[in-house]
Image (cartoon, grey):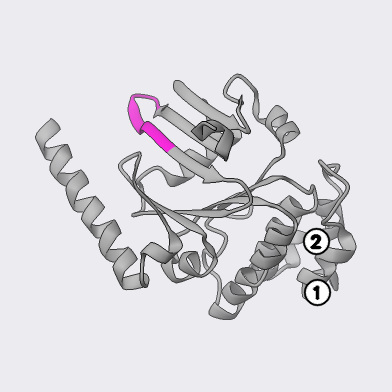
Amino acid sequence: MGQTEQSALLVEDLHVFYDRSHVLHGLNLRVPSQSVTAVVGRNGVGKTTLMHAVMGMHPASSGRVLVNGVDLMPLPAYRRRDYGLALVPQGRRLFRTLTVREHLQLVKPIRPEPLNLESLSELFPSLFDRLDASASTLSGGERSMLSIARALIVNPYFLLMDEPTEGLAPMLIGAIADMFPRMREAGLTVLLIEQNLKFALSVADRLAVMERGEIVHEFDRDEVEDVSELSDLILAAGAVGHRRARIST
């Protein structure tokens, strides 16, 4: 069986530009089925651009995004939902005037089970106490929970999470980590972008280090001992990237 068939999500030779700025440089990434793959790296190396390109929110100039062997590159963002993709965007991106309930009713489910309002109420009890509250009245933690719940309620096969712990207190970060076993039970494949290395190590099955628009290391979680070792890998990748940049100029 080839690599494409073994991977639920496969990114191949992806190139993305913003005007004349070349952001993703032939990026390759493998996300095995029903696993959590965390992409880590310094700020500004293209992690969010990767998410947007996979979701079709920013056009790629070349490359492939394969979901179970189907290339999604020709499809607009709204069609990629048909293949089971859902996004938890950086910055939450909620509608201030809509209530919690209205956010959860925006999109029809991709599949009927296993996640529904009842099961999500068990994951987000404090949020479900405020179903009729507008997003503008929610706390930062509640807004993060709503952004995640909005993605989960459609019952995706592939969940893309861009910095879900950004700006959150440690207790709330722990609450988000506690959701991952339920996601695994639901059969989700998760691609996670995360700056919080402790959180990434606590939830991921695999890790990928990104530097200057490329994945430079991919490894299983048990191959790295702790946050300090992972941080050293990121710093080393950054040093190599700077040397390459000086040589190329």
What residue is shown with label 2?
134
Residue 179 spot, x, y in % from top left = 68, 67
Residue 208 spot, x, y in % from top left = 41, 51
| Secondary structure found at label 1 | helix
| Towards the viewer: 20 or 112 | 112
User: Which residue sits at x=65%, y=72%?
Assistant: 178
Determine crowd level at label 2: few under 14, some 14-19, many 20+ residues with C-alpha closer than 10 A: some
Residue 213 spot, x, y in % from top left = 35, 39
| Main secondary structure along the magenta-highlighted residues | strand
User: Which residue sits at x=52%, y=35%?
Assistant: 10
Magenta span: 18-28
Asked whether residue 132 is drawn in magenta, I would say no
What residue is shown with label 1?
125
Tag 1: amino acid: Pro
| Towards the viewer: 28 or 55 | 28
Q: Is residue 167 above or below residue 76?
A: below
User: Which residue sits at x=45%, y=40%?
Assistant: 29
**Residue 132 can be seen in this image:** no
| Secondary structure found at label 2 | loop
Is 27 positioned to the left or the right of 77 in the image?
left
Tag 2: amino acid: Ser
Is 144 positioned to the left or the right of 135 in the image?
left
Tell whether label 2 touches label 1 (CB within 8 Å). no
Q: Is residue 128 above or below residue 191?
A: below
User: Which residue sits at x=33%, y=64%?
Assistant: 230
Snapshot quadrant of residue 214: top left
Q: Is residue 213 above or below residue 104?
A: above
Which badge, 1 or 2, is on the more N-terminal residue? 1
